[in-house]
Structures are given as structure tokens and as C-alpha cells.
Image (cartoon, helix red, strand yellow):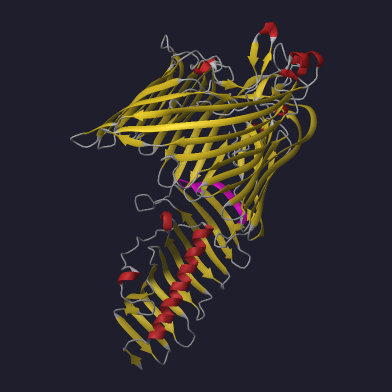
Amino acid sequence: MIDLSPAPGAAVRKLLMAGVAWLAFAAASGAHAQQPLATIPEVPATPAAADDGLGDEGYFLESDILVRDDAAKTMTARGSVEVRYQGRTLRAQEVIYDTATGVVTAHGKVSLINADGTAQFADDLTLDKDMRAGFARNFSTRMDQNVKIAAATAIRRNEQVTELNQAIYTPCDVCAEKPTPTWSIEADKVVQDKSRQIVYYHGAKIRLWGAPLLYLPLFWHPDPQAPRSSGFLTPKVGLSQRRGLSYQQPYLQVISPSQDVIISPQINTKVNPFLNVNYRKRFYSGMLEARMGATYEKEFDNRGNRFGDATTRSYILAKGAFDINDKWKWGFSAERASDALIFDKYDINDVYEQRGLFTSEDRRLTSQIFTSRQDDRSWLSISAVSVQGLRVVGTDPTTGIGNKFENSGAFPVIGPLVEGRWEPESPVLFGRLRLQGSGVMLNRSESQFGESPYLFSAYSHESGVDSVRGSVQADWRASAVVGPGLRVQPFAQARADAYKIKGIYLSTAAMATGDDAEVNYSRTLGVAGVDLSLPLYKALNKGGNVILEPLVQIAAGSDSSRVPVVVARNGATTYLYNEDSSAFEFDETNLFRTNKSPGFDLYEGGTRMNVGGRATFNTADGRGGSVLVGRSFRTKYDPLLPSRTGLQDKSSDWIVAATVTPVAGINAYVRTRLDSDTTKINRLETGADAYTSRLQGSVRYLKDNVDSNGERQENFETRGQLQLTKKWALTAFGQLDLVAETWRRRDLGVAYTDDCIRIDIIYQHEDRYSSTVTGLRLQPDRSIVVRLTLATLGDTGYSD
């Protein structure tokens, strides 16, 4: 008996749920395993789940004919079959449901369109009654990020194991005009084992434009569908003059749901292996991460020449941050290296970055421990800091060969360092009052003056200068607008410092005997004044505005101050103690600060007036610019301020700073300090950034006649990418040291980019410092680097 009446709802739901479960599972397995190819149909338009009116339990079935055969115990829908359920749409030419066995079979252009827009396709589909096992022929899917997967057959053996046979994976566009994708991964078989949380590959080939690039007969990795699983990660392959051929294979070991470790041995043909380890752990209140590396090796230079004695060489880069409660936090960083060049020799990246409260400088490692408390009205921090210097400073004077690096013993151990700030909630005298306190203790194991060319050479191996400082400060400021818009901001500051300093250089008598001298020093400082500004605003007819703002600051108070002095040769007085104010620059950022010194040891005082003007221009389409011009005047010459800053004379150097955006996407700036008498450039920093449809890049130029280290600086840096065509571009990067008259680094490359791949071929020339048996020198390191970036697979670098 054949019945053409509507099918029972439970049977239809069973049929559709079976198809949905199988196809969705097979698609997910293929997508994460990253496989196969075929011609994949475009996703047909499907009503969104929210618009079909079916809800969670409703279903819709449509076909040309629906046959229920009670004798054969089958239900068959034929001709343009479409079933909708829970936001998914299943389409096929024929769907057969065996009511006795529960087996579902679909034939002819089977497709499943999910609510998120992804789709799966097959010619034929069979699934058992429990939806645990099944088979699909000519299976394919289109996923997020334009990922396409196809397989000759897809087999779901049970709830844990799924196989794709003759599978291909690609995120590239494939069509009749372009049947071969830019890149793809093919595999004879891909097996996803959910119980073991592993994906196995048999006979995998990575292809570029159809040509085989890499063949792997068998490999496996953790199942991406699993939360986390142990397994091998992407290897790193390179070729350099220093280490020869290098292969680095990371392995992830999951220790617990909250901790793991990556063990990454680096195998080199010219030098001994190097082991890297990265341990991570999450706590309820914070996190811990520790990167470590070690080897047993001799010294070697940029050419791979080995010399000296073999020894253990290692590094550690660790950090931790924890919440004690909603106000208190604590943390630490540990950064140390046995060799100053270890990061260069073994190409270890991401070294000089902030891991705690204080930021590491380039080629310096900072270890610290700290705690802090913050609420709406106050801030308190307690910390200790130690620094290791890795910078090259010359040739070893004892041997005359090899590199000499910074003496880390001359860096003070800072600790404890205590800083606090508190502001009362209510105004004081109609203004804001801020109370601050600071205290620090510095200890050195070696004298920081050991390398002086004449006076202190005898003390190069003596103990360094130790000191203790305590400071308290009150800062009051109010603000009012009077008359036609004149902004008046009166201010007052008061500060008291106390020092205790111990060191052999502090008295002539101590120098003669070699004994330590001790100095107790205290001072009180204060300043009062007013900031005045009168912004003049004019709106433009076509949008935008112009603002002219004259600025004046008048301040009077204590004279400038520096901490204890020493009588040097020929009775000349030399100021030596300056721990925190040596990096003193005079520019637009501190032009209107009452005390321009960045630290406590040097204080800018006296009666002075800071004068300037700012002009700003903006248009409705985003173009515009601004310029600031100003200088400082004082009543008398001030010898305590560094001469290189241009602040000593009654009239300071001129400060000029400007930015301009001539067209959308291009920004330029200039910051300069001009001599007060000759208008000669004493310091200049200028550059531009461009972000347009064809050009992306930046240029930087810096000239400083005397920097904070007493050296002359002049360098130029540029980087950019010029788009020649839609797919081809030129890339460049350069660092030019104009003082040494040498290029520190030059890169010139060509890049190819399409919808799913980027290939960079770059020529690199870099001058590196290297430890050699022939003395300190910059050795050139030339290389050709090929970088291959595959969409959805990340960045893999190959260098030659």
C-alpha cells in the first residue's frame, strides 16, 4: 500500500536531524583537519532562522512527491526535496527514511545550509539510526574565511572517529576560470580521533599553484576541536651564516587545564643544539609565564667560527601578575642572560618588552618585584629593580680583543622604591590639592666612575656609590575663566628632599686615603606662579575651525639645585651625583612645566617665564595641522642646568613643534630646538607616515648634537611598501647611522599577495656586533629571506 499523506512529524524530524548531525560533524572535522578539493557549489539563498517562523520545534517539508510504503517500511521524498528545522535547510533530489532500521539515505545534490551561512554538499549520504555512523560520497563544504574542503568520501565510523579520503583543503578562490587554487593541502586520508584528541594525516602534500611544495607521509597534531591537547606545533626552519642549517621543533605538553609548557629544541649544523622552554600557568588571581633557554657551547662569531672554552649559556625571561584584592596587586619580572649576545646568536625574539611595572630599555634586561594599591583618590607602589646591561661599549681593555659590554655592577640595585599619591575629595582653596611622597635606596657593587679617563680610573674595582633619598611634595592648582575667555590657573608647589650618600669620590681626603666618605644632605624647594591662556576660536564656512592660543607661564621660587659636589682637578667643581635626571631633554612636552627635570636629583628653579603660542587648523574632510613655538626666559644665568638642553642662558633655545595632515592618510611632524643666538639646529626630529591605497610606510630622521650620554646622534630610518599592481609590491627597510657613516640594516624586497597567500623575498644586509678573536668590529650579515604566509595557517619563515 502506498500512502501519499503527510509524513509523521517525528519521522521528519528524525530524518532531518540525522542529516544535519552527520553533515555538520563531517564538515567540522574536515575544516579543522585542514584538507581537500573539488568543485564546490555556491551557497544558495536561504531564509534566516529568525525569519522562517518555525521556532525551535517547528519543521517544514516540501517535495514534488512524498511516498510512504508500509510494506517496505520506507518513507521517500522525491523531487526538489527541502526540509527546514532549527535554522538549517536540507536539500536533495531524493531522501529515503527506513522506518524499520532508522537508516537515512539522501541522493542527488545533497546540501545542508546552516544558520551561520556555512554549507555542506554531497552526491549521496547514508546515516544509521543512532546518527553515530555514516557515509558521504563526493563530500564538500564551504566554511568561514572562504575555506573550502572536499573529499571523495567521508566516513563517520562512530561518534569518535571520522575519516576523509582523497581530501583537499584550500581558502583560495576556485572557479571554472581558475580551477587550480593558489595553494592547497591534499591528503590520501585524514582521520579525526576525538577520544585521543588527535588528527592524523596520511600522504599529505602542500601545493603551490598545483606544484608540490612539501610531502609528509605521516604526521599528526592535536585536534583543534579539543579545548587543548599535547602535540607538535609548527616547526621553524632557517639557514644562517652563524648557525648553519637550523631546525626548531616546538612540542606542546598540556599539564593541566590551567598550565602547559612548550619545549622547543633548536638543532643547528654549525653549533651545538639550543633548548628553549616556555612555561605558562593561570591562577584564579593572576598568571605566570617563564621563557628559558640553555646550551653548552663555545663562543662563536657571525661566521660561525668557534673559539674559547665551552660553558653553559642560558637566559630567562619570566613575569607574573596577581590580584590580592580589588585594590592591591603584586607582580614580578625576572630577566637575565649569561651572554650579552645570546639573543642575537640564536635568533630569540620578543626579548625587550614590558613584563612588569617598569619597561626594559633596548638591550637591557630588567628584573623587578612590585606591589601597588590604587583607589579613586590615592596610589601607592613599592618595588625593587635590578638591571643587566647588554650593550657593547668598546674593546676589552685587559686583552685588547673581544667585545666589552656594559658593567652591570655599576647599575644600582633599586630597592625599595616607594611612591605614593593622595588627593582629598573636596577642593582646597577652590583648587585641587595633591600630596605625594617618594623614597628610594640605591646600592652598587662597583663604581660607576671606573671608566673615567683620568680621575676615577683607580677606583674601577671599588664599591660604587650608595644612597638613600626621601621626598615629600604638595601640589596645588586651581582654574578659572575670566573676561572674554582668559583662562587663569594659579599653582603652588612645595617639596622637601633628604639624602644620605656614601662613596669614595665625595671628598678629596677620601680619594687620597681610599676610604669611603658619607654625606648627609637636605633641602627645601618651592615655587608659585600662574598659567595664562586665551584661546581664540573661528569657525570656517565649509566646516572646520582655526584656533589661536597664546600661552604664558610665570613662576618664581627656589633657585635650581643639585645634590653634593666634589672638588676635581685644578680646583674645578664638578657635579657628579645625578641618578634620575640625566636623560634631560627640553622640548614641547615640558616647555610649560614648572620643573622640567624628569627626576628628583636635579631641580629647575629660579624666577622664569615660559612663553609660547599654538595654532591649530582643521577642515571638515580631516585635513589640518598645528604648530607650537615657544621659549623660556629667566632672570639670571643658571649653571646648574645641563648646557646641552639650551636652558642655562637668560633666554633659552627656541622650541618649535608642528604636525600636518595635507591629505587623508599622510601625516608629517617636526620637533626641533634652535639655538637662542644663531638659530642653528641643536636637536631635530622629523618624519612622516603614509597610509594610502598604494603606499604604506614611514620615514624618521633624528639629529642631536649632544645627547644625554654626551654623544652626537644622527640617524635615519625608513620602512614602507609600494603597491605596484593589485598583487605585486615593493618593500623596503633601512637604518642609517650618519655618525658612523654606515647602514646598520638594509632590506629590499618584493611581495606577492592574493586572496589566500603572501610571499616575501627580501635581501637583508645587517651590521652586527660580534665577539671575535680579532677584536671588536661590526660584521656584515647578508641573507636572502623568503617568507611564506598562507591564509588561515599563519606565518612560516624560510631563510637562505
Residue displayed at 43% across by 47% down: 756
Screen quadrant of the N terminus:
bottom left
Screen quadrant of the C terminus:
top right
Determine whether 667 is above or below 650 in the image: below
Q: Can residue 282 be seen in this view?
A: yes
Looking at the picture, tell me which residue is in the foreground, 393 or 247: 393
21 on left or right of 349: left
Counting from the top left corner in percent of width and height, residue 535 is at 30, 31
Residue 515 included in the magenta stretch of the image: no
Would you say the magenta stretch is mainly helix, strand or loop? strand
Looking at the picture, tell me which residue is in the foreground, 176 or 540: 540
60 on left or right of 793: left
* Residue, far bottom: 1
653 on left or right of 617: right
795 on left or right of 262: left
Q: Give the range drawn in magenta.
A: 207-220
